[in-house]
Amino acid sequence: MISMFALTRAEAEVRRRLLDVRCVSVELDLTVGAEVFRSVTVINFGCRTPGAGTFVDVKAATLHRVVLNGRELDPDALDDGRFPLEALAADNELLVDADMAYSRTGEGMHRYVDPADGEVYVYTQAFLDDGPRVFASFDQPDLKAPYQVTVTAPAEWTVVANSTGEREHVDGPDGDAVRTRFAPTAAISSYLVCVVAGPLHSVLSEHDGIPLGLHCRRSLAPYLDADADELLTVTRQCFDAYHGLFRQRYPFGGYDQCFVPEFNVGAMENPGCVTFRDTLLFRSAVPETEREHRAMIVAHEMAHMWFGDLVTMRWWEDLWLNESFAEYMGFRVVAESTRFAGAWTSFAGTKAWGRDADQRPSTHPVAPEGVADTADALQNFDGISYAKGAAALRQLVAWLGDEAFFEGVNRHFEAHAFGNATLDDLLQALAGASGRDVHAWAERWLRTTGLDTLQPVDGVLQQSSADGQLRPHLITIGSYDRLPGGALTLRHRKALELVPGTPTPLPEPRAELLVPDDTDLAFAKIRLDEKSWSAVRESLGRIPDELARAVLWNSARDQVRDGELPGSAYLELVAAHLPGEDSVHLVQDVLAFARGVVADQYLPPHRRPWALAVIVEVCRTLLRRTEGDAAATGLRLVAVRGLLGAATTPAEQTELGEWLEEGAVPGGPELDPALRWQLLLRLCVLGAVGEAEIAAEVNRDPSATSAEGAARCRAALPARETKLAAWEAVFAGDLSNYLLAASIDGLWQPEQRELLDELGLPGRFFPDAVAVAQRRGPAIARTLTTQSGFPLFAATAETLGHGERQLSRDDLGAALRRGLTDRLDDMRRAVRGRMLDGSAVEGE
């Protein structure tokens, strides 16, 4: 059973006032075996009240020794991840010697065996409170210290950590080994300590005096080599941009970027040793939007070197000082300093994540005034802390201006470098630099929950919110006229400052289409008046500005989720306007919502075949339109993916089989591993292929892609025995985080609703999810309550009842409670959406 322990804010404040952590030495031996590694930690620290007591955090498989100031302590005193330390001296040395367990869930020290070649790789993820799974520590962000890490590993391995290291050969249990001793870091928080090790493939370079490294497992070497120039170019451009904005140069020596397997998040900002999920090394063709997204992640993590690593929050209620800033800076730097000038259109899609989160029962302020413990803190790494916070910062920068904003930020860095800070520290710096009442702005934007709705009503731009709390906005409003032939053209665009409680007149004379926030500067729901909505239904695809179209597609999306627009009406917009769309950003986002949300969740099951037919025809039209167009390869790829996800009829099954046999889509693209597995998955769902074809594909490409693809496909087969086998593997087995995610994703197929209901799996999900989350911990709880892990297709009152009964339990961990709360809210919306479309005639 996983420990339910969480460090409370009150405990952390007591320990911070008591202790002064001066330096930490960590020695890790990775040659011990396949189940555990050896971890020896020495912490030198002061105690401001000699004679007092505290505790050190350590989550050991076996605790061998604890020595405090030369005094041996009883290892059996370890209790739920805490070891008590009594009668502290003014100056203390603590030694903790333990065996630590390797992880298969991406928490602590994750161990991975590459199915492509059998090679072993390990990496650490110490965030948020998983560091004590690797080494003993006073694990809270405001007890910073220099860390000196030493790692003993097999001789053929490369070891990367937060600083540069020197290697020496030593004897290991299986022969020659290498001990790498890394230089002491600058003062950093314990959650930022990182080690990556294995027979890595590396590409090394340099920029502006900073050593650069890119690292991955050997089987991905060709893909890293193919993308190294792009990754290094983006890295250099980001460094130049940040050095132009910040007076403090990059403060952590070298800069290694490590692409690691089965990583739970997109990336982690460990100073000098950033870790990324290695699916960001593309084994298959991807549209430019995915390369743009990767560039944004690179820029986001680099921003953390200042926002989070150089200056770190004191406690987790200020995590927005990390994530909101990194998200805003990531999009801004990519849009302004790389070839991906369309990144703000991607941000328009990202903000939908924030709007959804801000309307759920679990919503919270961007900067809450109190976070009780680390378990609750971890749940706030969500669309509010990232997307809403970044959007609020974009508003703040627009209000203050660049010069004042960055002057305040630089003063903040200078005042708190290598230390900790709070929201108030930053606000004081910004207020001092700008002379404006930033505290009042923060009270409205950062201390409240919910979002405003902006809509033209009776000649004014009406501003409203569910709770009456309104926020100031700086936006534009676009007026569009219709041209002969039906296209729309911009008549004028006016900048508006919305002051809560003050009416904002609309521009005159009245145009055919009036779009509030047509450049997507706000964080708000956008609604139109009747005349403008009529123009959108007729001419959405013929509005010239991509961002304006993004705002309108997002408005339609929000209306579906709010029960104001039937899912069928959204699909009518898709059918009318997506076939002529040139923006890969928009086609990708709209198709994903149309299939994954509208067709699978919001429409009654009898209307789903019609919805899939609409999506297939849209994708076919896009393919016909782009055939032979070398500049439209990304659009073709998105259309092929959309078609593969929606093909249903016998004729479509036959067509997919022909594509698989030919290894290509007529007119392109060729079927690379990702497309082959997506195509095979669809044929598995429809019962057109089985185990023989899955095994043949694995033999064709023995890789991590295939291991996950095979798990997904086997779980998707429409047979009682395969469904129950997948269920057993997910809920009673010990699958790694990625294989579990693939299996549960494959298991839930709307086409197989009757079989899944017959087996009772939607109802069984809830108690079984509780049991496995208690057994395996929060990472698995989060996996099971993602959109793809949860039975959202079974949007019925009965399923809701099953979920709500489990949610009422008092023994749920924070991760599972938050995940269930969010997904059940999504399901309630889907149930309401089905009722809105429930009067439709079957087969329409």
Image (cartoon, rainbow, N blue to C red):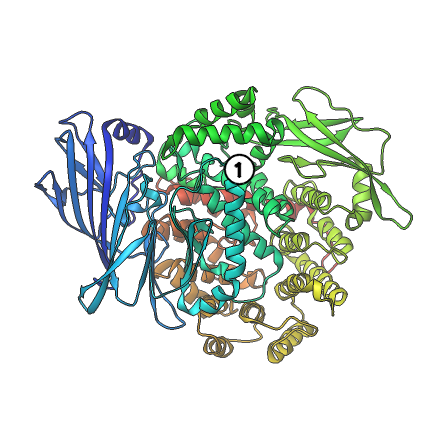
Q: Is residue 597 visible?
A: yes
Residue farthest toward the left in the current orientation of the protein: 71
Please tell me which residue lies in front, 518 or 795. 518
| Residue 758 image offset from top left, x and y in percent | 50, 61
Question: Is 117 placed left or right of 383 in the picture?
Answer: left
Mark 1, residue position: 245
Residue farthest toward the front in the current orientation of the protein: 209
Quarter of the figure with residue 535 = top right
Element on which disc 1 rests: helix
| Residue 785 image offset from top left, x and y in percent | 46, 49
Question: Is 786 placed left or right of 466 in the picture?
Answer: left
Looking at numbered disc 1 in the image, what kind of residue is underneath it?
Leu
Q: Is residue 35 visible?
A: no
**As drawn, 514 above or below 665:** above
Please tell me which residue lies in front, 638 or 28. 28
| Residue 412 image offset from top left, x and y in percent | 45, 29
Name the residue rendered at 20%, 26% in the picture: 48
Name the residue rendered at 58%, 66% in the picture: 285
Instruction: Indicate the quadrant containing the C terminus: top left, top right, bottom left or bottom right.
Output: bottom right
Question: Is 553 placed left or right of 397 in the picture?
Answer: right
